[in-house]
Image (tube, grey):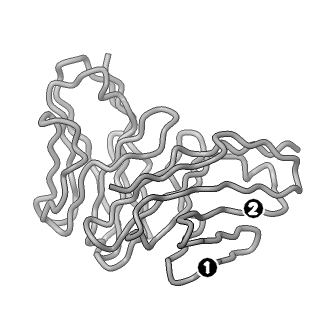
Amino acid sequence: GENVEQHPSTLSVQEGDSAVIKCTYSDSASNYFPWYKQELGKRPQLIIDIRSNVGEKKDQRIAVTLNKTAKHFSLHITETQPEDSAVYFCAASSLSGANNLFFGTGTRLTVIP
Amino acid sequence: GAGVSQSPRYKVAKRGQDVALRCDPISGHVSLFWYQQALGQGPEFLTYFQNEAQLDKSGLPSDRFFAERPEGSVSTLKIQRTQQEDSAVYLCASGIAEAYNEQFFGPGTRLTVL
């Protein structure tokens, strides 16, 4: 099955700086890579996703890059704000099978005002 | 529109009790998933429904776990003879259709087994 690894486990940045979170996956059949933001006690919320037919996707301050050859993808948050503080999870899934998501272990991002 | 809802939000059970957790997916969503999230971890897949058919239950940790979606909408996850290791947040997610991967999560049920 799929194995998703995520680094770092914790990340602290100054407000206004950029944050980068990296994930690797093992199953070459995976073709969908979402990122979820989860605040304490809340549901995971989809913030951005990318499919394997593109290498980069951007939405305002958030961008995701995908390297299919190396089997890794990254989340980039620019101009970080205190409200970006949360746990971020990467995930991978494939259209073959159940489409269930395989999640990384999470990155706790703290943006220091 | 309404998102995915789950009830109860919190459940405390004594070891050995049976519990039932409910998920109301987004109306019209074909796919429904259950995940288990232990403290400080990412969600882990339990089971998947496409309409009323349970197509994958490979993530259920033991035969004490049972899920159903009899009419293809509301789903119930039942845990029999709960154990302390069952303590976790149980998340439900729904998706538009099989061909689309996007999943929308509910707020979860936090189960504590004493």
Q: In the picture provided, is B57 more to the left or to the right than A62?
A: left
Place of residue A7 in the rendered image (x, y in percent of width and height, measured from the top left)? 63, 47
Q: Which mark, residue A92?
A: none
Asked where in the image residue B96 lies, by quadrant, the reply is bottom left
- Residue at 18% across / 22% down in the picture? B17
Q: Closest to the observer: B77 or B59? A: B59
Front: mark 2 or 1: 1
Callout 1 secondary element: loop
Q: Mark 2 near mark 1, Cβ–Cβ under 8 Å?
A: no
Residue most toward the bottom? A53
Quarter of the N terminus of chain A within the rendering: bottom left
Place of residue A109 in the rendered image (x, y in percent of width and height, measured from the top left)? 71, 45
Subunit ID for the residue under disc 2: A
Callout 2 secondary element: strand
Q: Closest to the observer: A62 or B108? A: A62
Number of numbered discs present?
A: 2
User: How far is disc 2 from disc 1 in space, using C-alphas?
Assistant: 17 Å
| Residue A90 against residue A112 in the figure, above or below | below
Q: In the picture provided, is B113 more to the left or to the right than B81?
A: right
Q: Closest to the observer: B95 or A73? A: A73
Q: Count neighbours of disc 2 (C-alpha within 10 A) and say few if under 14, some if 14 to 19, many if 20 or more.
A: many
Q: Which mark, residue A55?
A: 1
Asked where in the image residue B56 lies, by quadrant, the reply is bottom left
The three-letter code of the residue at mark 1 reads: Gly
- Residue at 32% across / 50% down in the picture? B45
Q: Earlier in the sequence, mark 2 or mark 1?
A: 1
The three-letter code of the residue at mark 2 reads: Ile
Quarter of the C terminus of chain A within the rendering: top right
Place of residue A60 in the rendered image (x, y in percent of width and height, measured from the top left)? 74, 74
| Residue A108 against residue B10 in the figure, above or below | below
- Residue at 33% across / 30% down in the picture? B11
Q: Which residue is mark 2?
A: A77
